[in-house]
Amino acid sequence: MTTAVAAVGRTPLVVVDDVAWGFVGHDVEASLARAGMTTTRETFHGIPSAGKIDRLTAVIREAGADVAVGGGSTIDAVKASGFLAGIRWVSVPTDAPTSALAVVYTDEGVFEEYRFFPRNPDLVLVDSQLVATAPATFLAAGVGDALATWLEARATSASGSLTMAGGTPTFTGTALARLSWDVLWENALVAMDAARDHVVTPALEKVIEANTLLSGLGFESGGLAAAHAVHNGLTAAPQTHGLAHGQKVNIGSITQLVLEGAPTSEIADFAEFTTRVGLPTILTEMGLRPEDTEEIQAVARAATVESETIHSMPFTVRSEDVAAALTSIERLGRRVRARAGLPEPQPYRPAH
C-alpha cells in the first residue's frame, strides 16, 4: 500500500468507518509507518451527504493532507471532498471505485444527486486479503451492484441513451459490462465461500476484478438504467436505511427484469442465483411489504423523476409501472425459494 499511495501524496488522510478500521487499521498504520508517513485518520459515519462532504473538506484542509484515502461507503465522500479541497484521492474499493462521480444523499439517507468530476481517482488500490478478511456481506453487496452493470448497459445500448461518462455507449464499455456479468455468474458462489472462510482463491480474485474494474468501467461507459433508479427510489423509504447500496441495487435489477417482460425463467434464475450469493430478492428483505402501498408508490415516484436513469430504458416507464413491478417480486421470490429448497427470507429491520 505504501509505495502506491506515496506515488500520489506524502500526507494522507485516511477516511474510514469504525467497522472497516477494526479489521484494516493495524495493517494500514504499519504500512504507512514503514514509509515514514504518519496515519491521520478521520472517522466517517453514515452516508455521504452534502453536509458530511463539506465537513470532510474542512478536515482535509485543516490537516494539510495532499491525498485522501477512502474505501467502502466513504469512497463517494472522499471523491467529493478531495475534489473540493483540490487534492488527489485514492479509492480502496468495495464499490464503484474507478468512476469520476460520487453519489450524494441527504442526512436522512435519501438519494439527492450524482456529482461528476473532471477526472477519475488517482489510484484504485485493492488488497485481496483485505477483501477476504472483511465481512462476506461486503463482497455480496459488490456482486449485487456489479450484476446490474450488464442489465443496465444493454438497456442503455438499446435505447441509445447517454452513459454516465456523458457520451453514447461504446462497444468497449458494453463488452466490459457483459464480461463482468459472465465472470460473476461463473465465480461468485465459489468466491463467496472463500470470503466466508477468509481466504483468497482464484475465484475470489476474479470476482474482485469484476466488482471493481469491469463493473466500474462498464457502468460509467455503458450506462445506468432502471436498476440504479430503483435503488435511488428505495432510499426514499426509511425502512430500507442501513442496507448496503448493492443490496438495494439487486432489488432494482429484479425490478428491471420484470419491467422488461423478461422470460420468467430468466427472472427466476437471477433471483435464485442472487439469493444464493446472499442478496435480498424480495420486499420483506428490504423492510417493506407488498401491502405497503404508500411507501411503494413513493419509491416508484422517486425512481421515475425526470432526471433519473430509468429513462434510459428503451421504452417509457411510468411510476405506476415501477410500483407494480416492485409489488410483484415478493410472490415471485418466495416461489423461487420454495422451488429451490432455499431458506425462508428474514425480514429486515433497520438498526435504529
Image: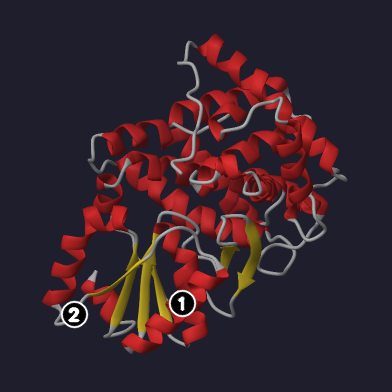
Closer to us: 307 or 131: 307
User: Residue shown at 59%/50% (left/top)?
Assistant: 177
For badge 2, the amino acid type reads Thr
Tell me if residue 95 can be seen: yes
Quadrant, the N terminus: bottom left
Q: Is residue 233 above or below residue 17?
A: above
Q: Is residue 285 above or below residue 342?
A: below
Q: Residue furthest front?
A: 352
Question: Which residue in the protein does label 1 denote?
Answer: 55
Query: x and y percent of residue 248 in the render?
Result: 57, 42
User: Residue shown at 72%/37% (left/top)?
Assistant: 296
Q: Which mark is residue 275?
A: none
For badge 1, the amino acid type reads Arg
Horizontal side, residue 75 vs residue 248: left or right: left
Q: Is residue 233 above or below residue 47?
A: above
Q: Residues within 10 Å of mark 2 (few under 14, many from 20)?
A: some
Query: x and y percent of residue 299 in the render?
Result: 72, 43
Query: x and y percent of residue 35 in the render?
Result: 15, 79
Q: Residues within 10 Å of mark 1 (few under 14, many from 20)?
A: few
Closer to us: 37 or 288: 288
Mark nearer the viewer, 2 or 1: 1
Q: Is residue 265 above or below residue 318?
A: above
Query: Which SS class for mark 1?
Result: helix
Question: Which residue in the protein does label 2 denote?
Answer: 38
Query: Which SS class for mark 2?
Result: loop
User: Residue shown at 57%/56% (left/top)?
Assistant: 108
User: Residue shown at 62%/55% (left/top)?
Assistant: 110
Considering only order in the chain, which callout, 1 or 2, is on the residue closer to the N terminus?
2
Horizontal side, residue 146 vs residue 29: left or right: right
Q: Quadrant of residue 201?
A: top left
Q: How is the image coloured?
A: secondary structure
Q: CA distance from mark 2 to mark 1?
A: 22 Å
